[in-house]
Structure formats: structure tokens, C-alpha cells
Image (tube, rainbow, N blue to C red):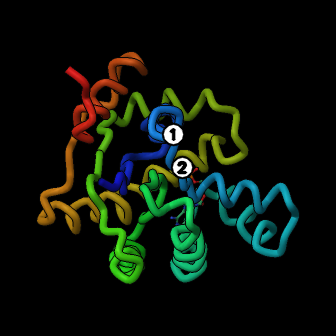
Amino acid sequence: MTRNWLLYGAPGSGKGTQAEALVQRFSIPHIATGDILRAEVRSGSELGQRAQAIMATGALLPDDVMIDIVRARLAQPDCSAGFILDGFPRTLPQALALDGVLGDLGHPLDRIVYLRVSEEELLARTGGRGRDDDKPEAVRHRIQVYLEETLPVLDHYRPTGLVREIDGEGEVSAVSARVLEALGEATA
Ligand code: AMP
């Protein structure tokens, strides 16, 4: 049995927090493209310098750059029993590329969990994280990009029957229970 999972939701929907809980429980890697990019920024690499300028505005990096990063990461041996993908795919071209990459690797997605959080709650949450791209202007842009480019990706996956939509508001532990249920991992 594989645990090839995709967590889906707006910036601030709690994907990262939920993913960390799943990492602890199932010992599978958390592949968060935002985290990968922030590590590049810290390292001062050429990609990091480019990413920093784009991320600060709340815009997306080019699809080809992101697809290369994710393709390389998913090919690592630690992904063979499963993975938690978070923050990718964010556009339809990324989703189509992911389908191809996972098909080539023989690791098709097992479940997609969509954490639904109201816009008011998203604004309240991202305001408090203190990240560089959490300035009000960047937050507004990120939410706009999410609505225009990322939300339609869910429609791409709906016909697969893999999508489970859950309420992402409330206590972290309550959301965790819903996530486990949605993944088919709830115990009793
Ligand atoms: P996140 O931590 O997932 O909210 O990502 C932070 C920022 O990294 C985003 O606002 C984008 O600028 C960039 N980023 C992360 N993932 C992607 C992706 N899949 N495609 C394009 N840009 C991304």
C-alpha cells in the first residue's frame, strides 16, 4: 500500500501543519515546494535569488522551474512508500506535468485532501505568520493567484474521484482527525 497524498488548499489553510502531523505518523516525506524555495533563498543560490524576488510579491515561479524541482524530488528513493505533496501543483500545466511524472514513476496519487477555509479566516491566519511574503499586499496577491490559477486545478482532479473536501477551520486536532478520515487512515 502506498500513501501518495496531495494536500490542497489556499495559502494559510493549514496544509503545512497538517502535513507535519502526517510525517510524524507515517514517516513519509513532506514535499512542500514553498519550503524547498525558502531553503534555496537561504542558501543564496541563483534559483534562490530569483525565487526571493518573485515570492516577495506573492506571484508564482514559472511552471517549468517548479516542475523540474518536483520531478527530481519525487524520483528520490524515500518517496517510494509515499509522500505528502503540499503547494504543488498550483496551475493546470503543473497538474498535467505531475500526472506525467507520477505515471512515469509508477506512483499515482492515492488521495487528494482539500482543506476548505473561508477567506476571512485565511487573511487572519496569514497575517500572523511573520513571513516575508505575509505583507498585506503580497497576501492579497497570493490569494488572488490562488483563486484564479490554483483553485481550478481541483476541477482537474475531481473526475478522478480522489478528492475529499474537508472543513479546515477549528482546532488543529479536529482538522487532523478529519484529514485522517479523508485519507482513509482513521482508526476506530
Ligand atoms: P507556499 O509556502 O506554498 O505558500 O509558497 C510560497 C511561495 O513560493 C508562493 O507564493 C510562490 O511564490 C512560490 N511557490 C511555491 N510553490 C509554487 C508552485 N508550485 N508554483 C509556483 N510558485 C510556487
Q: Which x, y percent locates residue 88?
A: 46, 62
Amino acid of disc 2: His
- Element assignment for label 1: helix
Q: Which amino acid, mark 1?
A: Val
Residue 23: image tag? 1
Q: Residue at x 60, y 50 (%)?
A: 138
| Residue situated in front as seen by the camera: 13 or 162 | 162
Question: Which quarter of the figure has residue 155?
Answer: bottom left
Q: In this image, 176 relative to 156: left or right?
A: right
User: Which label number is shown at residue 41?
Assistant: none
Above-or-below relation of 64 to 32: below
Q: Is mark 1 within 8 Å of ligand 1?
A: no
First-in-chain label (1 vs 2):
1
* Dot 2 crowding, Cα within 10 Å, few <14, some 14–19, many 20+: many
Rendered-image quadrant of the C terminus = top left
Q: Which residue is mark 2?
A: 30
Residue under the point 68% across and 60% down: 37
| Disc 1 to disc 2: CB gap under 8 Å | yes
User: In this picture, is 2 found above or below 120?
Assistant: below
Q: Nearer the viewer, residue 6 or 121?
A: 6
User: Count the marks: how many?
Assistant: 2
Indicate left or right for 102 with 187 as reference.
right
Name the one closer to the observer, 176 or 165. 176
